[in-house]
Amino acid sequence: MPAPLPEPATEATAEPTARATGSPVPSPPPAAPDDPLGRERAHLAASRAALRAMRADVEALDIKDVTANWVNSEVLKGQIEERIAALADLAGTPLFFGRLDYARAPGAEFTGGTEGGDGSDAFYIGRRHVHDTDGDPMVVDWRAPVSQPFYRASKKDPQGVTVRRRFGYTGGELTAYEDEDLTDAGGEERAGALLQREIERPRVGPMRDIVATIQPEQDEIVRSGIGGTVCVQGAPGTGKTAVGLHRVAYLLYAHRERLARTGTLVVGPNRSFLRYIEQVLPALGELNVAQATVDDLVAHVEVRAVDSPRAACVKGDARMAEVLRRAVRSGVTMPVEPVVVVRGSRRWRVPAYELEEIVRELLDRDIRYGAARDALPQRIAHAVLVRMEQAGEAPDDRVQDAVARNPAVKAAVKALWPQVDPVKLVLRLLSDGEFLAEHARGVLDEEEQAAVLWEKPARGVKSAKWSAADAVLIDEAADLIARTPSLGHVVLDEAQDLSPMQYRAVGRRCSTGSATVLGDIAQGTTPWATPTWREALAHLGKPDAAVEELTQGFRVPREVIAYASRLLPAIAPGLAEATSVREAAGDFRVRAVAEGELDAAVVAACHEALRKEGSIGLIAADPRIPALGAALADAGLDCVAPGEETSGAARLTLVPATLAKGLEYDHVVLDDPASVVGAEPDERTGLRRLYVALTRAVSGLTVVHARPLPRQLD
Ligand SMILES: Nc1ncnc2c1ncn2[C@@H]1O[C@H](COP(=O)(O)OP(=O)(O)OP(=O)(O)O)[C@@H](O)[C@H]1O
């Protein structure tokens, strides 16, 4: 194994920002004591210089003497490159965003932060750790234990903090700060102007991190231990995605080695969503987190067909796991003949009844089909060895291995425990009514069996018209044959849409690790969705996971969330309406137009929205997209598809309603709600789709409709 990456060499010098191995860096001019902003700017400049020095130290590392061979040297080079990338000073990303002052007891030692003046220790909180040439912290990583009070301390429970300071930036420039005095126990707790500004800022481009403003209830989820699975139910815009991504970053910090070995994965609903969130973790310095959709995880075959809702529901039902379990083992047969192994002049015979005992014992054990198949020749060989010993021979392990490879033993294994190909097995189940009936007996009724059977049996694996749910069945079968490797942690976003079988597919990828499950039952838009979190967690294999609820909404303006929440009694009775922390009232209007004027009115609403700052999303039922695309083009308005980068010139995204989940835009123009509802197979799913579409807006929503609005909105 290569040696771990050595810490960059540091050497104490009188000059805090100069270093031993890199080029000296000029220290910023000292700020006047009565110029606190100037002092903070000086600390920022010094921290930047220290970061540059840390980076130069790594760049200057000479690994020639450290490594013995080519492989080690390549691994080490890779680690160094990663470290250099992690130490980049990103333009426009503040190096620190907060500061905590701890009162120092009279006579107590300086605790290793920065001298905060007036006898306090100050810790600057940022995205990454920066230290000076003495190794003393100049900026503390937001994930370090010492940073936790930045997110959790309050006037009621100050956790030793006297002052919490938040910094305001314009570009990379530190331009403001705001203090909260936490020593005033009776004082009112309220969000400051900087926090409010961060929440209200216009959105452009992909999702950004929220590291400067994580709220206490969010922080509890972010920092909960790696051993436990957490499920978060939260209304639209309560920060579920943000929390899940920050939790990964936190876990990678707290358990770096373990997760480097086992891996982490973020699962999202589709590619455009993954593109939307893909920059959050790199901005937090985490470059090695895989992202995938559930379909990517189970991509054993090319998916070319769409199931009817009924077929997809039955195929997604957890009972299919039992049907597959039976089918996988259906080729196992009980022996009727003995195995006779010839070695030299002797013949060794294992009778059929003893072979049957071995087979039955393997069937009863909780091991994978393939592992049992691998064990069978050794078991038969062992039975032969026992006979050899009884006959006075003294065979060793090598003899057992040789017997296990004997053609007679191999032939018996082939007959008793045949190899199973998961793809061919599922192909047969979906094509051969008798085979399905045999294994679905007592599990699926006749109607259900008919629903999953293909109308036209497939001729072969390649020509079969596989659906997404079929691929999940193949994944289950593959896991019954050989265990799927487990990752250390999986974040599952927009989980409310998963079928029980999909939960099982994700669950086996974190069977020895933990998971963060995020979703909103009210936004579930698949007919096969799992109805409750408890049930979902049981299918995931984590029945004891805690279910937390987030209700504070950071995205949707108050008036808009109130309007969308009118749908809640119909789509998710019992779920609490989200509150909105946004102070800006939002710009909300509903416009009724005549049928023939709809497209023009929608284009006009887009024009209006484009006069304002930020991103614009035009959301419409999927079948309406081509017509609206043409209308926008005729009007000379450029637009992009979801997940494509918006720019100053193209701020407008044309969003099919089925892709809107998880995304957000400053201004949303929503085309004809009745069409959005009507494009779904049933009313409840339609209203849920509409709820998703209505809750994408950050500052403004314009609903334009020609057909009457669904009655729940009137
Ligand atoms: N603590 C916070 N400070 C600032 N912004 C926040 C905070 N929490 C969430 N946000 C912002 O609120 C918006 C919504 O967050 P996010 O997309 O994570 O919500 P969600 O619960 O996943 O929503 P949905 O249910 O629609 O998928 C994002 O722009 C996010 O950056």
Image: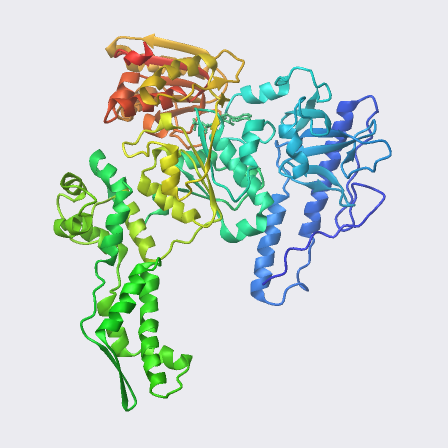
Q: Position of residue 104 (x, y in %)?
A: 80, 31
Question: What is the number of callouts on the image?
Answer: 0
Between 568 and 380, the one lying in front of the other is 380
Q: Position of residue 444 (x, y in %)?
A: 19, 43
Q: Position of residue 449 (x, y in %)?
A: 16, 43
* Residue sitting at the far bottom: 345
- The quarter of the picture where residue 391 lies is bottom left
Residue 270 shows up from this direction: no
90 to the left or right of 483: right
Residue depicted at 34% across the width and 58% down the height: 368
* Residue sitting at the far front: 390
Residue depicted at 60% across the width and 51% down the height: 81
Between 647 and 240, the one lying in front of the other is 240
415 to the left or right of 388: left
Name the quarter where the C terminus is drawn: top left
- Against 44, residue 78 (above or below) is below
- Against 250, residue 77 (above or below) is below
Name the quarter where the N terminus is drawn: bottom right
Residue depicted at 25% across the width and 12% down the height: 707
- The quarter of the picture where residue 661 lies is top left
Residue 701 shows up from this direction: yes
- Against 445, residue 155 (above or below) is above
- Against 476, residue 534 (above or below) is above
